[in-house]
């Protein structure tokens, strides 16, 4: 399950809002770091469940570019689509074609790799990470990964 800070106090974590923070429900960040270190010492890899396809209303990146009249992300948002681009959407749909979103996700992935030393990632709703940009052209997942990383988070 995702460990990012999410909306509310009780959730499975699939309603993320703060991608660089451990949710308060799971305890302090240093406890998670100790857990990961202990798992590594015992020969186990840690694959972090991440949700980079949507975010919800209390996310600062959603609120920065909000269209109050239509109650959705504004058309000028560099992070979110005003109208979802796929049928599987919940919350506010991230704009994976945007360089700003790609950089934000890349920064978040690097943070978890470096700060917490996770071994890889499981991407929630990976169908939502591919977009048709031009007819027949797909934006593959590796376009959003930190430079030098394998598409599954292995650097």
Image (spheres, rainbow, N blue to C red):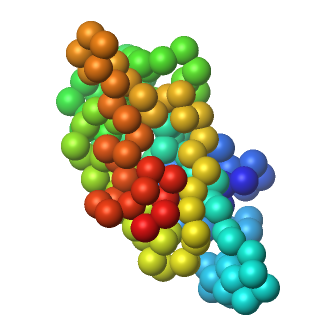
147 relative position to 114: left or right: left
Above or below, 80 relative to 24: above
Residue 4 in view here? no
Can you tell which quarter of the image residue 133 is in?
Answer: top left
Q: Position of residue 115 (x, y in %)?
A: 48, 79
Residue 1 left/right relative to 89: right
Dividing the picture into quarters, in which one does residue 89 lie?
Answer: top right
Residue under the image location 54 percent in, 15 percent down? 87
Pick the residue in front: 120 or 70: 120
Vertical placement of residue 87 versus 27, above or below: above
Picture quarter with the C terminus: bottom left
Query: 51 or 132: nearer the eye?
Result: 132
Q: Which residue sits at x=32%, y=39%?
A: 79
Left or right: 140, with 65 as reference point: right
Q: Position of residue 31 (x, y in %)?
A: 70, 84
Which residue does the image show at 45% across and 33% down from the upper left? 129
Residue 37 appears in the picture as rendered: yes
x, y percent for residue 80: 35, 33
Answer with the quarter of the image where residue 108 lies: bottom left
| Left or right: residue 34 compared with residue 140 | right
Classify 117 as above or below 150. Answer: below
Can you give x and y, in whole percent of width and height, for residue 85 in the image?
A: 41, 18
């Amino acid at each position: 399950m995702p460990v990012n800070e999410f909306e509310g106090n009780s959730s499975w974590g699939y309603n993320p809002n703060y991608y660089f923070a451990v949710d308060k429900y799971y305890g302090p960040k240093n406890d998670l770091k100790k857990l990961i270190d202990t798992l590594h010492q015992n020969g186990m890899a840690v694959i972090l469940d991440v949700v980079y396809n949507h975010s919800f209303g209390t996310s600062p990146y959603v609120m920065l570019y909000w269209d109050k009249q239509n109650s959705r992300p504004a058309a000028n948002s560099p992070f979110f689509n005003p109208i979802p681009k796929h049928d599987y959407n919940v919350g506010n749909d991230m704009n994976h074609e945007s360089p700003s979103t790609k950089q934000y996700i890349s920064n978040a992935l690097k943070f978890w790799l470096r700060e917490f030393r996770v071994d890889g990632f499981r991407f929630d709703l990976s169908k939502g990470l591919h977009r048709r940009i031009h007819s027949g052209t797909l934006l593959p997942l590796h376009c959003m990964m930190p430079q030098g990383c394998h598409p599954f988070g292995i650097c």
